[in-house]
Image (cartoon, rainbow, N blue to C red):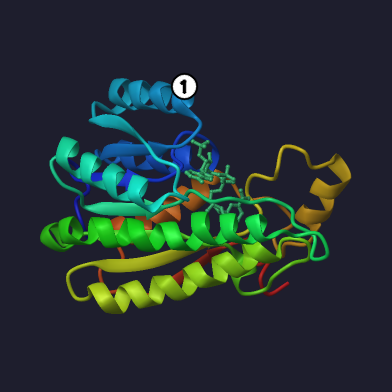
Amino acid sequence: MADLSGKTALVTGAARRVGRSIAEALARRGMNLALHFNRSRRESLALAAQLRRSSGVRAEVFRADLRDVPEIKRMVARAAREMGGLWALVNNASLYVKTPFETATLKDWDDHMNANVRAPFFLAQAAAPHLRRSRGRIVNIVDWSALRPYASFMPYCVSKAGLLCLNAALAKELAPEVLVNAVLPGPVLLPESMSAGQRRAVQAATLLKRLGSPEEVAKAVAFFLESADFSTGAALTVDGGRLIA
Ligand SMILES: NC(=O)c1ccc[n+]([C@@H]2O[C@H](COP(=O)([O-])OP(=O)(O)OC[C@H]3O[C@@H](n4cnc5c(N)ncnc54)[C@H](OP(=O)(O)O)[C@@H]3O)[C@@H](O)[C@H]2O)c1
């Protein structure tokens, strides 16, 4: 069991939605937070202030467009320097856009691959010296659809399948110093544009007949960081049974 208090986690896409819940859960455990954002500057600054106030931890914000590899490298170096090292990297940020097969463009394909699988690779590469030194951990937020793709989101699902392979590949590469594990959420926070009928259908398609919560994903992340001392390369579904339904 790792005592998380005083250790630093870099969480990507931390300003809103699931990333925000992950940051809050880690701050409650006393972790210092490097909060990555791209467009959500205002929300990330507000979250940093809230975490400092509510948990007494250090929380700073770091911007990068994760489709840009030099930006990734600069952001990780800055975060490690300003936070005094890194113990955990949570690859949470992702691009999720509907891209029907017939009309998906080269840009759609490249943007999903670059944000969802290339970026976690280069984030891990840049963070690795710090994580090896601190004997730290990586958690990759994947998706149940990496194992069972659904229609109209092919670049997204394929990018998440790539991330699942990257999870195992990083676990091998970084052993024994760094543990690398994946959380595969099911439907947790649906796109804001979804109709009530569509929401009901998504809920009905899980075995547990409900949506998950961002807090349930955050608990799984905390489990891998705090308790899963003999797990690396593992993948935990937090999907209400959606994968096997
Ligand atoms: N929500 C669900 O029900 C669900 C289900 C299965 C899996 N997941 C996975 O869980 C994670 C979190 O889900 P979510 O719904 O909270 O995600 P989200 O709202 O779709 O995206 C999270 C953040 O990713 C960041 N991001 C996107 N493209 C980026 C880029 N090019 N560069 C830098 N940052 C970028 C954005 O940061 P800014 O706002 O700062 O730009 C965004 O706020 C994702 O990995 C997702 O695939 C979620």
Q: Position of residue 118 (x, y in %)?
A: 45, 62
Query: Count of labels shown?
Result: 1
From what the image shows, is residue 135 above or below residue 94? below
Q: Is residue 228 visible?
A: yes
Locate residue 68 relative to residue 125 in the image: left or right.
right
Q: Quadrant of residue 2?
A: bottom left
Quarter that holds the C terminus: bottom right
Q: Is residue 234 visible?
A: no
Mark 1 Cα-neighbour bin, 10 Å: few <14, some 14–19, many ≥20: few
Locate residue 204 relative to residue 34 in the image: left or right.
right
Label 1 belongs to which residue? Answer: 42
Q: Farthest residue toward the right? A: 197
Residue in the image at 53% along x and 51% along y? 94
Label 1 element class: helix
Residue in the image at 29% along x and 38% along y? 33
Q: Position of residue 124 (x, y in %)?
A: 31, 60
Q: Position of residue 176 (x, y in %)?
A: 19, 75
Residue in the image at 62% along x and 59% along y? 186
- Give the residue type at disc 1: Arg
Q: Position of residue 200 (x, y in %)?
A: 83, 49
